[in-house]
Amino acid sequence: MKIAILGAGAVGRATAAVLCSRSHEAILWSPSGRSTVAFAAGEALAATGALSGTFHPTVAATCETAIAAAHVVLLALPCEAHRKIMDMIAPLIRPDQIVIISSHCSLGSIYLAQRLSARHVAAPIVALGTTVAYSRADGPAGVHIWFVRDRIECATLPATASAAGLALCETLFGKRFAGLKDVIAATLSNVNGQAHLAMVLANFTRMERAERWHPFEYATEAVSRFAVALDRERLATAAAFAAHVQTFAEFLHFTYHVPQGPVADMFKAMHALGDDDMAGPATLESRWITQDIPFIIAPLIQLAGVAGTNARVHEAGVEVLSALYGRDLRAGNDILPTFGLQGLSVGDVRALAQSA
């Protein structure tokens, strides 16, 4: 199949490598054009780590040409770029195409579905709870893949297309997917924001002083307790929406291939794997905060408000970080305000997640 990958950073490159390794055709497009220069000049995509090899994705000069040639359109961009790119692609998506959001944040699938509906286009949208691989961009034409995840939770909008969405994901990436009831569940499946919130609050001055620190080494017993407290709130909110999502411990197990147990022990096992080139943020302008707080944590807090569940630990973490930054970190979300979740019921929100 031909897959247009919108974004050619770490996520886009890792996704392209996995797809090419499975004999699919990856078409890369970069909004700025900078991250596809080497590929456009003929360099191969060099993958190292859990998936090693050289691959040859094609490069599209424009978003229009990328989408026109594709069976599937996959967003592999930072959350803060989602609305802009969704606005760009909404006039271009055909009814015979399927869109995949990797990974889903801030109910973006509902926003895109509403934009498509205005054109009377009902292309299914698959929301992945996390990315297919954990990776980093490596130079102008490389990607290092630490892990290809064993289990990825996903949901499809409309919910009636769930079987087709799950089948497509397995065709593209293999049998590593667990289907969820709706895209609310996919939103609440994403645990990266909770992990990063716990780590950065406990290691904030390391970031501020640009120190080098390994995130798993400094995920201490106390940090692990913090992460588990956040997870309890996430799971309670998910339960209020009848969303059966994986626990934080399950996510660590299926991503990092360590035995499931107490979270502190799992972090120790993850650090013992010896990936010394992993490093926590060395700047305050890190996506662990500037992306995760507005696009992962803030939506959870709003959904907890709809459900009437407790999100006090999340709220306290955001308040402390906002005080440290001197600005409201939730304000960067440009998708949530379009829904007006305040005043909606659980049933109202679930109805949106079923058919938008």
Image (cartoon, helix red, strand yellow):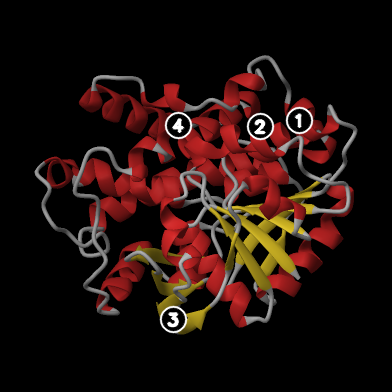
**What is the three-letter code of the residue carrying label 2?**
Asp
**What is the three-letter code of the residue carrying label 3?**
Ala
Residue at position x 76%, y 30% in the image: 115
Q: Quadrant of residue 43?
A: bottom left
| Residue named by callout 3 | 50
Q: Position of residue 127 (x, y in %)?
A: 67, 50
Nearest to viewer (mark 4 / mark 3): 3
Q: Position of residue 108 (x, y in %)?
A: 64, 37
Badges 1 and 2: C-beta atoms under 8 Å apart?
yes
The answer to which of marks 4 and 2 sits earlier in the sequence is 2
Disc 2 is placed on an element classified as helix
Q: Note whether 36 is above or below 299 in the view shown.
A: below
> Looking at this view, is 244 or 272 the one in front?
272
Q: CA distance from mark 1 to mark 3?
A: 38 Å
| Residue named by callout 1 | 115
Q: CA distance from mark 4 to mark 2?
A: 19 Å
The answer to which of marks 1 and 3 sits earlier in the sequence is 3
| Residue named by callout 2 | 87
Image quarter in which the N terminus is found: bottom right
Badges 1 and 3: C-beta atoms under 8 Å apart?
no
Residue at position x 61%, y 44% in the image: 187
Pick out the residue farthest to the bottom: 53
Residue 323 visible in rendering: yes
Q: Note whether 199 is above or below 279 in the view shown.
A: above
Nearest to viewer (mark 4 / mark 1): 1
Disc 3 is placed on an element classified as loop
Badges 4 and 2: C-beta atoms under 8 Å apart?
no
Disc 4 is placed on an element classified as helix
| Residue named by callout 4 | 294
The answer to which of marks 4 and 1 sits earlier in the sequence is 1
Q: CA distance from mark 4 to mark 1?
A: 22 Å
Mark 1, other Cα within 10 Å: few <14 / some 14–19 / many ≥20: some
